[in-house]
Image (spheres, helix red, strand yellow):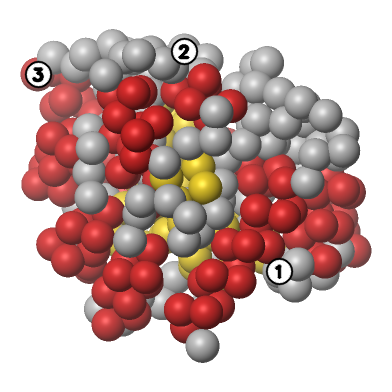
């Protein structure tokens, strides 16, 4: 099993005003202390933009970069996402996974527009173009507050495009999709995995419009693995049986407010649970 980390588990996020942003050295050092040897890149500006400088920093902590989250507008017929993506992956290591999100075009994940038929045709067409023309692994990440969030939208992508998925167990459940059902229905479409556990009651309040997504993250919607309502054991077992050989990224999104916070503690608990499944 290939296990990696993600800076968002340390509160490092692209959303303006998200919370306290820890330094790369602290985040990477804590990843290494947990025995992790790989990480996603984090948002623009977190790691050095020059590949050589970034590689030296990661090497100092015994880490390699295996992918990165890239939000891009896919539904606007007046924008060419391929032009935007050509610049982004150039800074990625050659084998790193582009974890694409269907961005709304606005900052944050607390509101989104409703797509019309033309918007869906554009989005699905762009997904296939990106999958076909990008010379590196690309996955689509269903994500709260993007254009692919709900069960119906996930199914529309599965039925209407050939792009592989990033199976984010937390965002899928929060958006109304059972991630284990996706594993059972479409294991061949899963090329990357973000492992989260979720407080289903808080997720339901987000779907009902009672609280925003950001408020839910602040309230602890994401739990260490095994302490929420996602069937992590069933998902890992199902993926293993299906021959999944990609990365499992430990990702429990948090909002930090103080330097003395201990986000590594939740990652440590998640790693212990995951290793217990696979022992």
Q: Position of residue 108 (x, y in %)?
A: 51, 18
Quarter of the rendering containing residue 235 = bottom left
Q: Mark 3 touching mark 2, by CB under 8 A? A: no
Which one is closest to the eye, mark 3 or mark 2?
2
Left-right relation of 210 to 221: left
Q: Position of residue 38 (x, y in %)?
A: 67, 65
**Looking at the image, is mark 1 or mark 3 earlier in the sequence?**
1
Disc 3 from disc 2: Cα separation: 21 Å
Q: Mark 1 touching mark 3, by CB under 8 A? A: no
Closer to the camera in the image, 262 or 139: 262
Q: Is residue 271 shown above or below 218?
A: below
Q: Which residue is under mark 1?
A: 36
Q: Which residue is under mark 2?
A: 106
Number of residue marks: 3
Quarter of the rendering containing residue 65 = bottom right
Closer to the camera in the image, 127 or 171: 171
Left-right relation of 36 to 188: right
Tell me which residue sits at (38%, 63%) in the image: 232
Secondary element under disc 1, as helix, strand or loop, is loop
CA neighbours of label 3 inside 10 A, class few (<14), some (14 to 19), many (20+): few
Q: Position of residue 66 (x, y in %)?
A: 60, 61
Tell me which residue sits at (14%, 27%) in the image: 121
Q: Which residue is under mark 3?
A: 117
Q: Is residue 250 shown above or below 105?
A: below
Can residue 268 be seen? yes
Left-right relation of 132 to 199: left
Disc 2 from disc 1: Cα separation: 33 Å
Tell me which residue sits at (47%, 83%) in the image: 278
Q: Position of residue 96 (x, y in %)?
A: 56, 59
């Amino acid at each position: 099993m290939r296990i990696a980390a993600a800076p968002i588990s340390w509160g490092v996020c692209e959303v303006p005003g998200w919370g306290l942003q820890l330094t790369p050295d602290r985040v990477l050092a804590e990843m290494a202390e947990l025995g992790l040897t790989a990480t996603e890149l984090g948002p623009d500006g977190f790691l050095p933009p020059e590949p050589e400088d970034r590689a030296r920093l990661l090497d100092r902590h015994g880490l390699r970069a295996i992918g990165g989250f890239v939000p891009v507008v896919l539904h606007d017929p007046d924008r060419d996402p391929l032009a935007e993506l050509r610049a982004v992956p150039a800074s990625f290591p050659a084998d790193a996974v582009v974890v694409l999100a269907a961005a709304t075009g606005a900052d944050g994940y607390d509101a989104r527009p409703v797509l019309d038929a033309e918007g869906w045709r554009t989005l699905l067409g762009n997904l296939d173009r990106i999958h076909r023309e990008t010379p590196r692994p690309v996955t689509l990440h269903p994500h709260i507050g993007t254009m692919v969030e709900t069960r119906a939208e996930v199914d529309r992508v599965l039925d209407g495009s050939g792009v592989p998925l990033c199976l984010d167990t937390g965002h899928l459940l929060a958006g109304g999709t059972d991630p284990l059902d996706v594993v059972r229905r479409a294991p061949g479409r899963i090329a990357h995995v973000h492992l989260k556990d979720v407080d289903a009651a808080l997720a339901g309040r987000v779907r009902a419009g009672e609280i925003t997504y950001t408020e839910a993250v602040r309230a602890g919607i994401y739990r260490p693995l095994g302490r929420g309502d996602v069937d992590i054991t069933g998902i890992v077992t199902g993926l293993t049986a299906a021959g999944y050989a990609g990365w499992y990224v430990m990702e429990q999104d948090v909002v930090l407010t103080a330097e003395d916070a201990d986000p590594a503690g939740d990652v440590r608990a998640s790693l212990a649970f995951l290793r217990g499944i696979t022992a």
